[in-house]
Image (cartoon, rainbow, N blue to C red):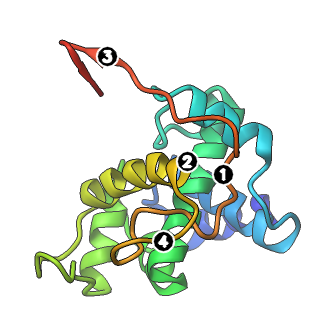
Amino acid sequence: SSAMYQLLAHEHVPGQDQWLKEASGDLLARLLEAPEVYPSSASTFMQQPNISLISPSSSASTLGVRGGQQIFLSYLLQRFGFPLLQQTFLQPGTGLEPLTAGLAAADLTDPVSGHTFTGDQLFAEFIAANVASYLVSQPFGDGRYVHLVAEMPPNIPPSGYVMDGRLD
């Protein structure tokens, strides 16, 4: 199913960034065949904070990249459902540009600020959810800072780097 998605994406959305093609194909395969993010890939991602989610999983350390991408896409599914993913997958661009364009096309606004969400903002909220999900198991606030769809590794805290005297 992953290869089928990539074939269809190549035909219908030729400008789609390679990382998004691969992550979308993996999501489709996971939803159809294996509903949970594999624990080892989620653990690898949580232990290696420098893993880029916009790297094609075929050209990087596949386990952590694939785990991070699937947790991120599960987070987007949890927050906005399939309509956002459908809009995102139809957008050309690199990096988080397709996500930002999908958010604008779906006219999704942050209820706190009233502004349209951006890909960068959702990525920051995703990182906060990674930490919060380790600390609490129940949603708080408006629910944006906890994972409810992806099963996070229970005994592995998210890692970070100390840079210039602060944790990044």
Disc 4 crowd rating (10 Å Cα; few below 14, some 14-19, many 20+) is some
Which label's residue is closer to the chain start, 1 or 3?
1
Mark 4 lies on a secondary structure that is loop
Asked whether residue 4 is in view, the answer is no
Which residue does the numbered mark 4 point to in the structure image? 139
Q: Which of marks 2 and 1 is in front?
A: 2
Three-letter amino acid code at disc 3?
Val
Asked if residue 32 is positioned above or below residue 60 in the image, the reply reads: below
Dot 2 or dot 1: first in sequence order is: 2
Say which residue label 2 marks.
Answer: 134
Q: Where residue 52 sits: x, y (%)?
A: 46, 34
Badge 1, how many Cα within 10 Å: few under 14, some, many 20+?
many
Q: Alpha-carbon distance for marks 4 and 3?
A: 28 Å
Taking the spot 72% from the left edge, 39% from the top edge, the residue there is 41
Report the side of 123 relative to 130 (left or right). Answer: left
Front: mark 1 or 4: 4
Residue at the image position 58 percent from the left and 45 percent from the top: 68
Answer with mark 4 or mark 3, whichever residue precedes in sequence.
4
Residue 54: give its label: none
Amino acid type, callout 4:
Pro
Q: Residue 152 carries which label?
A: 1
As shown in the figure, which amino acid type bears the numbered disc 1?
Met
Gap in angstroms between the C-alphas marked 2 and 1: 8 Å
Where 104 falls versus 17 (above or below)? Answer: below
Of tags 4 and 3, the one toward the viewer is 4
Residue hosting label 3 = 162
* Circle 2/circle 1 CB separation < 8 Å: yes
Q: How far apart are marks 1 and 4 (CA)?
A: 14 Å
